[in-house]
Image (spheres, rainbow, N blue to C red):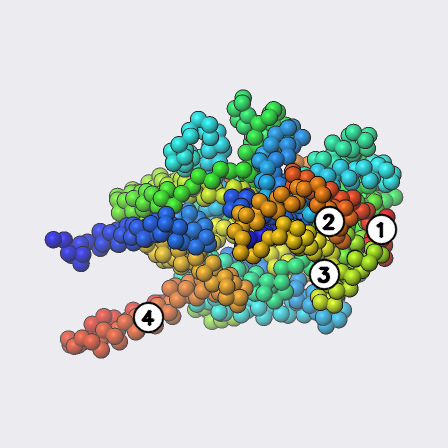
């Protein structure tokens, strides 16, 4: 293997990136968003758990940035006054977003009335957490989690007749694709995502059309991220004239140089004017979506 | 000169067991050092060593003592995480990696042994199915407790918390255990020779235990507890001995296993892992130590080797389950035993002359 | 109000455990074995119901009946192929075989239906009941689950106390060989036990997934273990015991999640099991059995 495009989710990527770092293989992950993937980021107490892995870059926002962006968005758009959070504390992704959300909310003066957690994505009963949120009077529930537990939370909130606004992050993407899911339960759910298949621009529409033709399904943001990754790698390889007979170490050094070059700007379907810092983080603007009538609509 | 055949059965088995392990190492280690092993096999060597030790230690409980333990992964995880904490604490103090690894493994074993003692005292008062369920319960409890544990280290020493990383109260330190996310940033100091030595150590302890007076007491308890009690064998004491030894060895294997990865989560040491080890033990033959070693190696490597065969990897667990059921049926059902006896009887009579009445009997199981 | 709400949730969850526990306790009482695969029969029942409604467009109630039928056949098959040959074997061997069957079911389901979670459509057609001006909401699933479990328990109790088959089951549970000597067809009796247990498991599976609409091949595993805990807690072999154990376990689990911690709720459940087994090994309603030498 000479270059790695992957992995999709955070937890395996933390482990895989450690290995690719040891083997000097350039790694561009489409959607593994934890700071543990790129390493070198201090947490809220200033402790650095994992040193920077210089060969690892992300196409997606880091969780802290998503957490901050979510708090900013909620404040700006006045989406809720009393906020509850339900997060997965067994998952680096969810915990990372929550921690930054919490500190940003504090700075902005947003009131978080209740925080509850669950230990893993196969938890099935959320009545305790939802009850706690309801009793605290929350009118907006922030869900920095993946869509599988989110689907359960929405269903249980509905049968409990608890109807706050729900706000998710990019992990919520895919909820409309859960088999047999009653999409009316996801009505008015908001999420922050870099990609929407309904966006009007030509690049997105081309991608969606070709994807539908090949796979018979609408692409979600994981698909879009991966698509952008391949093209970003392609453009970087072209710029550095990388050939397939080069060793993975040489390819790695060349790609690191290219990605951290401030003049390397990538325009993809998950964002325009995408650039990378040498910390591995990506710079692009987030988009907010709301689910209306079973489809994503830009906010 | 000692003839192989003339040795007692127990010596023969022992020599075969040690021999196979030593020969395997003698072949693989030079290959590994020369870099001639594929990345895939290279990555499996240490986990296989760990699982072999786990299988042997579980065999002590299940095969020799005759009690089903469904929480073995719990002892593995106690050893793994206490080992990780110990290794992180010693990182600056003990620079020499093999020594640090050895100390880590020993500490992992000690903590797991303590866990074995604490769990054994209540558990071993129960029997059969209830004992099995309680060991399963303890396995889950251990997993859940480690899920809540946050450990960090800084200039001031170790900090513990059961709420979150913030309440550790550290400044500029390193987080070792991050609750449900487990241990991150482990420095991988496990080596194949270390695994080999651990296997030898385990064999030494277990084989000597089995063929000693203590071991005979333990098998007596397995075969007929009431009879054993009636001749004065202190059942609890011997059960506890077997259990603690089994737990300690599992802890050592866990520590070795953990030091081979950069991250491990408590989630991994769950009921499924316990079952996996149980499958290794059962398919290798209960009480058969050499069988455990071979079964573990084969069953662990098989999925990796056949990964390229699309069909197999999808059907792998299904095939394991079917084979497990078939093996249990063949070795335990009265019909199968009878058929086996019949075949043996007929084979014997085909090759030997009958001496007035036939040799061997087919016993009816009522 | 949260207390009442949690209590109701607990009883509802507990009723599901109770239905599963009834299956465990019957099989243990009569065939003297721990059917580890019971939890996975639950999962199969839920999948069959899902397939009936989704692909065959069968009305929900009929899909439950189909699930019960399929699981009954499955239970009898498992008993005949995997457990009957081991009647004389050690309980260790039987337990391991049961674990093998459990894995077989899980992986077969994985191959057939994949690991993608399916959002199960509730078979309960009623809406939630809202009391006290919206402060207390009781879901229809809760009400139906509790009602069904009570009905099952009553029916089962009647069946075992009266009726020839019930008497045969009690006889086999007391002394299998003596029952055979009395002319009772022990094989048929044990098969019938498994059949009833598996049918109940199908019902439990459908109800479980109606309340917690996420179905994967491993959905039945943890509830199965917890239900076994409940059966032991209440006294294995005792039908009212299974009911009591199930309800109590459900309440304890919900209360532990709400008031202590969601991570530790399982640990607390199991700790209680351990304490009960040490203090009163036969469970709350079980009878002590003397071991003959």
Residue at x-position 83% and y-position 56%: A201
**Residue C171 coordinates in the image, percent (x, y):** 50, 63
Q: Residue at x 73, y 39 (%)?
A: A65
Disc sitting over residue A266 in the figure: 2
Up/down of A246 relative to A65, above or below: below
Q: CA distance from mark 3 to mark 2?
A: 35 Å
Residue A298: mark: 1
Q: Which residue is mark 4?
A: B340
Mark 1 and mark 2: span between their CA atoms? 22 Å
Q: Position of residue B19 (x, y in %)?
A: 27, 52
Mark 4 or mark 2, which is nearer to you? 2
Q: Are marks 3 and 2 on the same chain?
A: yes
Within 10 Å of disc 2 (Cα), the crowding (few <14, some 14-19, many 20+) is: many
**Considering the numbered disc 2 on the image, is that residue within a helix, a strand or a loop?**
loop
Task: Give yes or no for contact between labels 1 and 2 (Cβ–Cβ under 8 Å).
Answer: no
Of the pair C109 and A192, the residue shown nearer to us = A192
Viewport quadrant of the N terminus of chain A = bottom right
Q: Is residue B310 above or below residue C264?
A: below
Lower sequence index among marks 3 and 1: 3
The chain letter under disc 4 is B
Q: Chain of mark 3?
A: A
Q: Are marks 3 and 4 in contact (CB under 8 Å)?
A: no
Q: Are marks 4 and 2 in contact (CB under 8 Å)?
A: no
User: How many neighbours does mark 3 have within 10 angstroms: few (below 14), some (14-19), or many (20 or more)?
Assistant: few
**Residue depicted at x 53% and y 47%:** A249
In the displayed structure, does residue A209 sit left or right of residue B360?
A: right
Q: In the image, which is nearer the foreground, mark 3 or mark 4?
A: 3
Which residue has dot 3 on it? A179
Check if mark 3 and mark 4 are on a common chain.
no
């Amino acid at each position: 293997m000479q270059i790695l495009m992957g992995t999709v989710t955070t937890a395996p990527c933390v482990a895989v990136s450690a290995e690719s770092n040891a083997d000097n293989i350039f790694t561009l992950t489409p959607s593994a968003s934890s700071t543990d993937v790129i390493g070198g980021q201090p947490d809220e107490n200033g402790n650095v758990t994992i040193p920077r892995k210089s060969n690892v870059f992300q196409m997606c926002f880091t969780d802290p940035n998503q957490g901050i962006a979510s708090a900013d968005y909620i404040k700006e758009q006045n989406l809720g006054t009393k906020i509850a959070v339900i997060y997965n504390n067994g998952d680096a992704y969810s915990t990372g977003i929550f921690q930054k959300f919490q500190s940003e909310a504090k700075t902005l003066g947003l009131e978080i009335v209740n925080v509850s957690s669950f230990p893993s994505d196969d938890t099935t009963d959320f009545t305790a957490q939802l009850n706690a949120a309801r009793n605290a009077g929350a009118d907006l529930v922030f869900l920095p989690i993946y869509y599988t537990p989110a689907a359960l939370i929405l269903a249980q909130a509905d049968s409990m007749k608890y109807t706050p606004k729900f706000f998710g992050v990019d992990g919520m993407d895919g909820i409309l694709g859960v088999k047999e899911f009653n999409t009316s339960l996801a009505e008015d759910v908001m999420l922050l995502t870099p990609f929407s298949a309904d966006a009007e621009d030509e690049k997105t529409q081309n991608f969606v059309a070709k994807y539908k033709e090949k796979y018979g399904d609408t692409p979600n943001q994981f698909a879009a991220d991966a698509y952008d990754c391949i093209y970003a790698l392609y453009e970087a390889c072209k710029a550095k004239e990388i050939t397939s007979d080069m060793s993975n170490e040489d390819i790695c050094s060349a790609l690191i140089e290219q990605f951290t070059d401030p003049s390397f700007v990538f325009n993809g379907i998950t964002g325009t004017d995408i650039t990378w810092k040498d910390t591995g983080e990506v710079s692009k603007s987030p988009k907010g979506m709301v689910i209306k009538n079973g489809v994503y609509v830009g906010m | 000169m000692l003839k192989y055949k003339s040795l007692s059965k127990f010596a023969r088995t022992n020599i075969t067991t040690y021999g196979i392990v030593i020969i395997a190492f003698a072949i693989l280690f030079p290959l590994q050092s020369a870099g001639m092993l594929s990345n895939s096999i290279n990555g499996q060597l240490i986990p296989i060593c760990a699982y072999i030790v786990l299988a042997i230690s579980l065999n002590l409980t299940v095969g020799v003592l005759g009690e089903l333990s469904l929480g073995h992964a719990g002892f593995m995880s106690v050893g793994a995480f206490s080992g990780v904490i110990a290794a992180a604490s010693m990182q600056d103090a003990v620079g020499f990696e093999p020594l640090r690894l050895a100390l880590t493994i020993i500490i992992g074993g000690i903590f797991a042994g303590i866990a074995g003692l604490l769990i054994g005292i209540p558990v071993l008062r129960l029997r059969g199915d209830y004992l099995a369920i309680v060991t399963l319960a303890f396995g889950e409890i251990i997993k859940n407790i480690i899920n809540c544990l946050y450990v960090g280290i800084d200039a001031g020493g170790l900090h513990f918390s059961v709420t979150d990383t913030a309440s550790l109260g550290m400044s500029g330190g390193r987080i070792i255990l991050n609750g449900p996310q487990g241990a991150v940033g482990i420095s991988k100091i496990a080596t194949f020779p270390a695994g080999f030595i651990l296997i030898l150590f385990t064999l030494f302890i277990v084989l000597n235990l089995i063929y000693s007076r203590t071991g005979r007491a333990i098998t007596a308890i397995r075969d007929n507890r009431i009879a054993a009690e009636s001749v004065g064998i202190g059942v609890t004491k011997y059960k506890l001995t077997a259990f603690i030894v089994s737990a300690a060895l599992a802890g050592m294997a866990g520590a070795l296993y953990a030091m081979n990865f950069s991250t491990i989560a408590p989630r991994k040491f769950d009921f499924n892992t316990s079952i996996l080890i149980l499958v290794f033990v059962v398919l290798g033959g209960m009480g058969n130590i050499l069988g455990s070693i071979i079964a573990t190696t084969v069953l662990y490597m098989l999925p990796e080797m056949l990964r390229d065969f699309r069909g197999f990897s999808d059907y792998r667990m299904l095939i394991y389950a079917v084979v497990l059921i078939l093996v249990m049926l063949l070795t335990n059902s009265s019909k199968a035993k009878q058929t086996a006896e019949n075949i043996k009887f007929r084979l014997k009579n085909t090759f030997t002359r009958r001496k007035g009445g036939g040799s061997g009997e087919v016993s009816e199981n009522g | 109000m949260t207390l009442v709400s949690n209590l109701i949730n607990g009883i509802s969850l507990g009723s599901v455990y109770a239905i599963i526990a009834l299956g465990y306790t019957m099989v243990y009482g009569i065939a003297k074995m721990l059917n580890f695969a019971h939890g996975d029969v639950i999962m199969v029942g839920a999948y069959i119901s899902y397939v009936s409604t989704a692909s065959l467009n069968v009305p929900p109630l009929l899909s439950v009946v189909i699930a019960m039928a399929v699981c009954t056949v499955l239970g009898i098959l498992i008993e005949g192929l995997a457990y009957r040959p081991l009647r004389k074997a050690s309980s260790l061997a039987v337990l391991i075989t049961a674990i093998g069957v459990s894995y077989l079911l899980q992986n077969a389901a994985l191959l057939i239906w994949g690991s993608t979670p399916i959002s199960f459509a509730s078979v309960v057609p009623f809406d939630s009941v809202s009391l006290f001006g919206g402060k207390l909401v009781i879901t229809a699933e809760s009400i139906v689950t509790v009602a069904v479990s009570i009905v099952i328990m009553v029916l089962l109790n009647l069946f075992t106390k009266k009726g020839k088959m019930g008497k045969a089951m009690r006889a086999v549970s007391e002394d299998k060989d003596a029952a055979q000597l009395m002319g009772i067809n022990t094989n048929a009796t044990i098969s019938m036990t498994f059949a009833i247990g598996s049918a109940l498991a199908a019902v439990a599976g459908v109800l479980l997934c109606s309340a917690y609409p996420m179905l994967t091949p491993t959905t039945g595993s943890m509830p199965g273990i917890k239900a076994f805990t409940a059966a032991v807690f209440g006294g294995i072999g005792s039908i009212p015991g299974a009911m009591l154990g199930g309800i109590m376990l459900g309440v304890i689990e919900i209360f532990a999640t709400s008031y202590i911690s969601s991570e530790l709720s399982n640990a607390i459940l199991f700790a209680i099991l351990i304490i009960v087994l040490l203090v009163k090994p036969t469970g709350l309603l079980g009878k002590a059995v003397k071991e003959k030498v």
